[in-house]
Amino acid sequence: MARVTTTAPRTPSDTSDTAAFAAELDRAIDGEVDASPRRRAEYSTDASNYRIPPQVVAYPRDAADLEAALATARDARVPVTMRGGGTSVAGNAIGPGLVLDTSRHMTRILDVDLDAKTARVQPGVVLSELQKKVAAQGLRFGPDPSTSTRATLGGMIGNNACGPHAVAFGRTVDNVLALDAVDGLGRRFTAGPRGLATISGLEELVQANLALIRTEFGRFSRQVSGYSLEHLLPELGGDLAKFLVGTEGTLATILEATVRLVDVPPVRLTAAFGYADMPAAADAVVPMLAHKPQAVEGLDARLVARVAGATGPVPDLPHGAGWLFVEVGGDTEEEARATLAALAADSGTASWREVSDPKEAARLWAIRADGAGLSGRTPENQEAWPGWEDAAVPPEKLGAYLRDFDALMDRHGVVGQPFGHFGDGCIHVRLGIPMQEDGRPLRAFMEDAAALVAQHGGSLSGEHGDGRARSELLSTMYSPEAVDLFKGVKHLFDPENHLNPGVIVDPDPLDAHLRRPAAKHTPSLGIALAHDHGDLAEAVHRCTGVGKCRADSIGSGSGFMCPSYQATGDEKDVTRGRARVLQDALNGTLIGGLAAPEVRESLDLCLSCKACSSDCPSGVDMAAYKSEVLHRTYKNKVRPVTHYSIGWLPRWLKVVGLAPRLITAVLKPRPIQKLAVSIAGMDTRRNLPEFKVPFRRSETARTRRANPAKATRLDNLVVLWADSFTDGLDPEIPDAVVKVLEDAGLDVVVVAGDACCGVTWISTGQLDGAKKHLEHLLTVLGPWAVNGVPIVGVEPSCMGVLRGDLTELLPKDPRALAVASSTFTLAEVLTGRAPAKPRDGWRVPDLRDVTAVVQPHCHQYSVMGYAADRELLARAGATVTETAGCCGLAGNWGTEKGHYETSVKVAENSLLPALREAPEGSIYLADGVSCRTQADDLAGVQGRHLAQLLLERLA
């Protein structure tokens, strides 16, 4: 066929062009239009290696809005890129010109037909929402990529997403029935079977290239690179809808989709099979497929080691260095067990076990689901990158391919941790390729990898699409005639190259627009960032963009991240969006450095809850980055008033402690309190606490005053550390802790008040002040810690500092590590996790008549974990409803002016609904002073510390 060239669209050439286009777009659609530098930075990258800032970002509200936006961009000759969850690892969800995000408003499930087993959805519907909608009827959408809690159906259609269960239920293309679409010329049509005549010239183009299409396309299920032209063949029904799946938004834009739903087997069993290595595991796949498993996933010892280092011990795996996780299904348990037994007989290994505990099975699948984030660092803690992310070969060639691929990585000196969909021959891997300087090492490896996969009859991409990572390499996999055919198809749908330019046809070079090389080394000034080699640029580039922070983990009870995003639904307020703004401030052109107003705006609604530090598979710690940025921004400068008022709260509590009753009486009248609160920079809807006689002046503290010189017997000794907050605001709580510990047979000495952790200095970025407080704290607690005496804390946020921030702020002080490893919660001591243990025969008080709403403090969840408290309450027999996510006050953050409305919305994520729905007579259990204050302020509910509840029952 004749070669066809496409016309490059123009992008707005200057600020005035952009402003005019944005204004025209704003007039054309009801949805939001945003051309601000901060918004453009948030959308300049996805989960790939690439950065292309758009000129404008818009959020269409419905199909009419989306069509109007496309028409406006087409008239202005501005290119368009569609975006759903933004989790593309190939760079197919970023582009110049206009980015249209459907995930904010176009999220309706329009219809579910249970008889036909179909659903009609808008493109912004998140897959997990559709799954929840139809789960009660025993149905699901078949494919389930690991990003299913934030991936949209539109994005899945664009990339032809698959996931573990594609081996049973097929790829996205196998489950799409019809598409309501608009092509690059503005023609709106319904795509489905026998639909070639819809696009002028398409039928003729297919007829002229039948032999080429039949020989080069559709060779195996995971051949998704390029355009899947086999769906246009007459013998396959000439299905235009299926053809458009996987075209990455380069040919048409999806307004609506009709998809197939499948039956879920009532019984499913999971088993793990161990092999000598990954290739040996791959060799065993084909015999297993004969038994029609639901999923066959591969996991490598290198990734398991990475998981263990990042998240702690993994569930027991059979002996081996490569594993297959297999799920089988059946209508009855007998049928499922028979299938598993037959599959195991053909597995080629005696090293296997059924994973019968559902929680353990979920943990195994979670390792696999978080693989893309967890493998973002090499075992040597170097950065690892996508690019060669999802190559696929026919399953029967997988073992040989993996052996050759390992040899290829060795030749290039590249470290990788492969895993993936072994049942479909699809392998995921992040590459430990140095990209700090330029893209030459990436190009060299990618060119050789493309040649290798082609040699094995495979596909550059098995499910994520080609994007900017692999489109340039399509000529390695396809003949020149096939590549030219792609151009011919593109010309029929989008002759002006208006839709997602730079992808598949006339592709950008794979080493153009790389994000990381532009990020210059930025030594940290306040926080050590030891895991990132002291480099703030490396730290903020931990964000791989997989978007787990966008998932509704709070609503599902599976995590705490990211509370502000759950409240606002705005990319600005999610961990990923903040990371992208910080990246641009360091290596981009949109944000003028870390002190820029866009950075302050991006970080403003970060609660510093630290949930991302534990929930993010890439290990992003936005609270730490926020502290570092605030430290840099305001060092030796005048700070916001709240940094001096709430940020110095422990200092003011010490002063107030001299006459607490008098000061409480003076501030009690509402007008005086509102004035004081306003002057302090706080929201006037917040109440000042009642100040009390500090715990340090109590009889309990005086008679148990800490003195290392008096300690003679250490094996039964604990040190109670009463932080500044509980010392001055809730002195009855440390008193209760002492009495519970002593009832458990432990000797208690007390330090109180004068050993401040500086948590409010840390959260406001006053890191020099925080270090001074911590240096003093080490003089008080250090001698006990180095002698192995457990330190028992009261307030979770303060214990979080000792267990986490302390070693990052004072990394060279050996006492810091000693204190960090010697600090325990009350529950950890009472459940035997500390060196000093309860006396033999001591039992936790009986709480079988207690029904409680329990709010784990987010710092406890993120740093110490809540397992000990959970175990203690279960052992005591309490009936517990455990909330998920931050309470919304988050220390000083929720009291500041401008944060109240969001603080309330965050509380509505979990806390307030749980309190409203709690049975009559329930109690509210919260160890954090912020959590108790929020419940009191917003719901009039008085909370109790675990120590108070236990002491009541001991009495």
Image: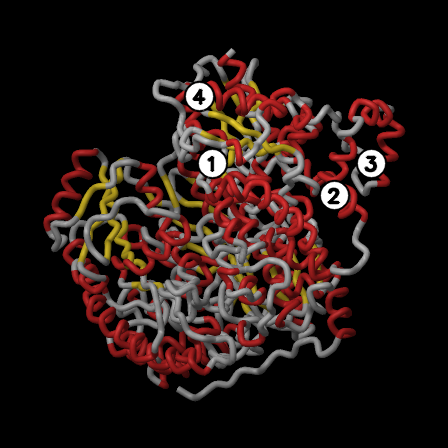
Of 376 and 141, which appears nearest the observer?
376
Separation of disc 1 and disc 4 at Cα?
A: 15 Å
Q: CA distance from mark 1 to mark 3?
A: 38 Å
Mark 2 packing: few (<14 Cα in 10 Å), some, or many (20+)? some
Residue 760 % position (x, y): 68, 44
Q: Which mark is residue 790?
A: 1
Which one is earlier in the sequence, the residue at label 3 or at label 2?
A: 2
Distance from disc 4 to disc 2, alpha carbons, whole Å, reads: 36 Å
Q: Nearer the viewer, mark 3 or mark 4?
A: 4
Report the residue at 32% width, 53% height from top: 164
User: Along the line of sight, which residue is nearer the eye, 331 or 47?
Assistant: 47
Secondary structure found at label 4: loop
Q: What residue is pinned by disc 2?
A: 648
Q: Position of residue 727 (x, y in %)?
A: 66, 30
Q: Is residue 849 above or below residue 657?
A: above
Answer yes or no: is residue 125 visible: no
Spatial separation of the CA atoms under disc 2 and disc 1: 28 Å
Please name the residue shown 49% across and 67% down the image.
Answer: 48
